[in-house]
Amino acid sequence: SATRVYDAWIVRAFHAAGDFIHRPRWRAGVRTVEQIQHWLPRIGMRCVCRMDNGDVVTLTSKYLQWLSDFVEFCETDSTGNMTWYTLRGVDDNRTEVKLDYYIPRKFPTTLWFRLAGKSAVKQSLDRSLENLEKVVAEIRLLDDEPVGTADYQ
Protein backbone atom coordinates (compact mmCIF):
# COMPACT_ATOMS: atom_id res chain seq x y z
CA SER A 1 0.00 0.00 0.00
CA ALA A 2 1.06 3.60 -0.57
CA THR A 3 -0.45 6.93 0.52
CA ARG A 4 0.10 10.55 -0.42
CA VAL A 5 -1.68 13.86 0.28
CA TYR A 6 -2.26 16.31 -2.58
CA ASP A 7 -3.08 20.01 -2.53
CA ALA A 8 -6.34 19.54 -4.42
CA TRP A 9 -10.05 19.26 -3.93
CA ILE A 10 -11.18 15.60 -3.81
CA VAL A 11 -13.13 15.85 -7.10
CA ARG A 12 -10.03 17.01 -8.97
CA ALA A 13 -7.90 14.25 -7.41
CA PHE A 14 -10.58 11.70 -8.30
CA HIS A 15 -10.62 12.75 -11.97
CA ALA A 16 -6.83 12.57 -12.14
CA ALA A 17 -6.61 9.12 -10.53
CA GLY A 18 -9.81 7.51 -11.78
CA ASP A 19 -10.01 8.57 -15.42
CA PHE A 20 -8.23 6.04 -17.64
CA ILE A 21 -7.24 8.80 -20.07
CA HIS A 22 -4.73 10.12 -17.53
CA ARG A 23 -3.34 6.72 -16.52
CA PRO A 24 -0.22 6.68 -18.76
CA ARG A 25 0.82 10.03 -17.33
CA TRP A 26 1.02 8.85 -13.75
CA ARG A 27 0.80 5.08 -13.29
CA ALA A 28 4.26 3.53 -13.35
CA GLY A 29 4.61 0.94 -16.10
CA VAL A 30 1.60 2.02 -18.19
CA ARG A 31 2.65 3.12 -21.69
CA THR A 32 -0.75 3.62 -23.38
CA VAL A 33 -4.44 3.10 -22.71
CA GLU A 34 -6.68 1.83 -25.52
CA GLN A 35 -10.25 0.63 -26.03
CA ILE A 36 -11.81 2.62 -23.23
CA GLN A 37 -15.35 1.38 -22.66
CA HIS A 38 -17.91 3.09 -20.46
CA TRP A 39 -20.94 0.81 -20.39
CA LEU A 40 -22.18 2.57 -17.29
CA PRO A 41 -20.28 5.71 -16.32
CA ARG A 42 -17.96 5.06 -13.38
CA ILE A 43 -19.38 1.54 -12.93
CA GLY A 44 -17.80 -1.30 -14.82
CA MET A 45 -15.51 0.88 -16.93
CA ARG A 46 -12.93 -1.12 -18.86
CA CYS A 47 -9.76 -0.39 -20.79
CA VAL A 48 -6.74 -2.12 -22.28
CA CYS A 49 -3.33 -0.95 -21.06
CA ARG A 50 -0.11 -1.55 -22.94
CA MET A 51 2.66 -1.76 -20.40
CA ASP A 52 6.28 -0.67 -20.69
CA ASN A 53 7.39 -4.32 -20.51
CA GLY A 54 5.22 -5.25 -23.52
CA ASP A 55 2.38 -6.88 -21.57
CA VAL A 56 -1.21 -6.06 -22.44
CA VAL A 57 -3.53 -5.83 -19.44
CA THR A 58 -7.29 -5.28 -19.30
CA LEU A 59 -8.51 -3.21 -16.35
CA THR A 60 -12.08 -3.20 -15.08
CA SER A 61 -13.20 -0.58 -12.56
CA LYS A 62 -15.86 -0.94 -9.93
CA TYR A 63 -16.96 2.14 -8.01
CA LEU A 64 -17.95 1.36 -4.48
CA GLN A 65 -18.66 4.59 -2.68
CA TRP A 66 -18.90 8.31 -3.39
CA LEU A 67 -19.45 10.85 -0.63
CA SER A 68 -18.54 14.53 -0.55
CA ASP A 69 -15.27 13.78 1.28
CA PHE A 70 -14.67 10.10 0.48
CA VAL A 71 -14.35 8.11 -2.76
CA GLU A 72 -13.61 4.41 -2.96
CA PHE A 73 -13.19 2.28 -6.08
CA CYS A 74 -11.20 -0.70 -7.23
CA GLU A 75 -9.68 -1.97 -10.46
CA THR A 76 -9.10 -5.58 -11.30
CA ASP A 77 -6.65 -6.54 -14.03
CA SER A 78 -6.89 -9.49 -16.38
CA THR A 79 -4.62 -11.59 -14.13
CA GLY A 80 -6.87 -11.09 -11.08
CA ASN A 81 -4.69 -8.53 -9.28
CA MET A 82 -6.63 -5.67 -7.75
CA THR A 83 -5.77 -2.08 -6.89
CA TRP A 84 -8.05 -0.48 -4.32
CA TYR A 85 -8.25 3.33 -4.42
CA THR A 86 -9.33 5.32 -1.38
CA LEU A 87 -9.56 9.11 -1.59
CA ARG A 88 -10.32 11.12 1.56
CA GLY A 89 -10.85 14.82 1.68
CA VAL A 90 -8.55 16.14 4.40
CA ASP A 91 -10.23 19.51 3.92
CA ASP A 92 -11.66 21.41 0.92
CA ASN A 93 -8.22 21.88 -0.59
CA ARG A 94 -6.31 18.70 0.30
CA THR A 95 -6.96 15.05 -0.54
CA GLU A 96 -5.30 11.87 0.66
CA VAL A 97 -4.99 9.17 -2.00
CA LYS A 98 -4.24 5.62 -0.89
CA LEU A 99 -3.51 2.69 -3.21
CA ASP A 100 -3.74 -0.85 -1.85
CA TYR A 101 -2.58 -3.73 -4.05
CA TYR A 102 -4.01 -7.24 -3.72
CA ILE A 103 -3.05 -10.49 -5.44
CA PRO A 104 -5.09 -13.70 -5.75
CA ARG A 105 -4.34 -16.38 -3.19
CA LYS A 106 -2.77 -18.89 -5.53
CA PHE A 107 0.43 -20.71 -4.69
CA PRO A 108 2.77 -19.59 -7.47
CA THR A 109 1.51 -16.01 -7.33
CA THR A 110 1.84 -15.61 -3.57
CA LEU A 111 5.27 -17.27 -3.54
CA TRP A 112 6.58 -14.96 -6.29
CA PHE A 113 5.09 -11.95 -4.52
CA ARG A 114 6.72 -12.81 -1.20
CA LEU A 115 10.13 -13.53 -2.75
CA ALA A 116 10.45 -10.77 -5.33
CA GLY A 117 7.31 -8.87 -6.12
CA LYS A 118 6.38 -7.10 -2.91
CA SER A 119 9.19 -4.53 -2.95
CA ALA A 120 8.77 -3.93 -6.71
CA VAL A 121 5.04 -3.30 -6.27
CA LYS A 122 5.68 -0.95 -3.34
CA GLN A 123 8.22 1.03 -5.39
CA SER A 124 5.80 1.17 -8.33
CA LEU A 125 2.95 2.44 -6.13
CA ASP A 126 5.18 5.08 -4.53
CA ARG A 127 6.46 6.23 -7.93
CA SER A 128 2.91 6.32 -9.28
CA LEU A 129 1.66 8.53 -6.45
CA GLU A 130 4.66 10.81 -6.96
CA ASN A 131 3.78 11.09 -10.69
CA LEU A 132 0.11 11.69 -9.86
CA GLU A 133 0.98 14.96 -8.14
CA LYS A 134 1.70 16.68 -11.47
CA VAL A 135 -1.48 15.33 -13.07
CA VAL A 136 -3.61 16.43 -10.11
CA ALA A 137 -2.10 19.93 -10.33
CA GLU A 138 -2.89 20.16 -14.07
CA ILE A 139 -6.48 18.87 -14.02
CA ARG A 140 -9.05 21.61 -14.40
CA LEU A 141 -12.77 21.13 -14.02
CA LEU A 142 -15.60 23.50 -14.91
CA ASP A 143 -16.19 24.18 -11.22
CA ASP A 144 -12.68 23.50 -10.04
CA GLU A 145 -13.03 24.49 -6.43
CA PRO A 146 -15.84 23.56 -4.07
CA VAL A 147 -18.60 26.05 -3.47
CA GLY A 148 -20.04 23.87 -0.75
CA THR A 149 -19.80 20.14 -0.38
CA ALA A 150 -23.57 19.76 -0.51
CA ASP A 151 -23.46 20.94 -4.15
CA TYR A 152 -21.49 17.85 -5.22
CA GLN A 153 -23.20 14.96 -3.48
Image: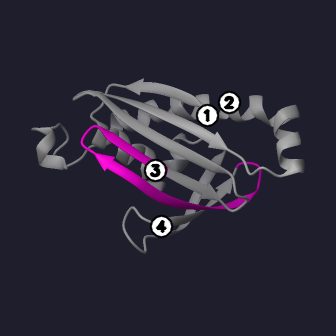
Rounded to the nearest whole Å, what is the CA distance between mark 1 and mark 2? 5 Å
- The disc placed on residue 44 is 4
Q: Are marks 4 and 3 in contact (CB under 8 Å)?
A: no
Q: Amino acid at mark 3?
A: Phe
Image point (63%, 50%), residue name: 82
- The disc placed on residue 111 is none
Q: Are marks 1 and 2 in contact (CB under 8 Å)?
A: yes
Q: Position of residue 59 (x, y in %)?
A: 59, 60
Rounded to the nearest whole Å, what is the CA distance between mark 3 and mark 1? 16 Å
Q: Amino acid at mark 4?
A: Gly
Crowding near the residue tagged with mark 3, few <14, some 14–19, many ≥20 C-alpha atoms within 10 Å: some
Whether residue 53 is in magenta: the answer is yes
Q: Nearer the viewer, residue 51 or 75?
A: 75
Label 3 vs label 1, nearer the camera: 3
Label 4 vs label 1, nearer the camera: 4
- The disc placed on residue 73 is 3
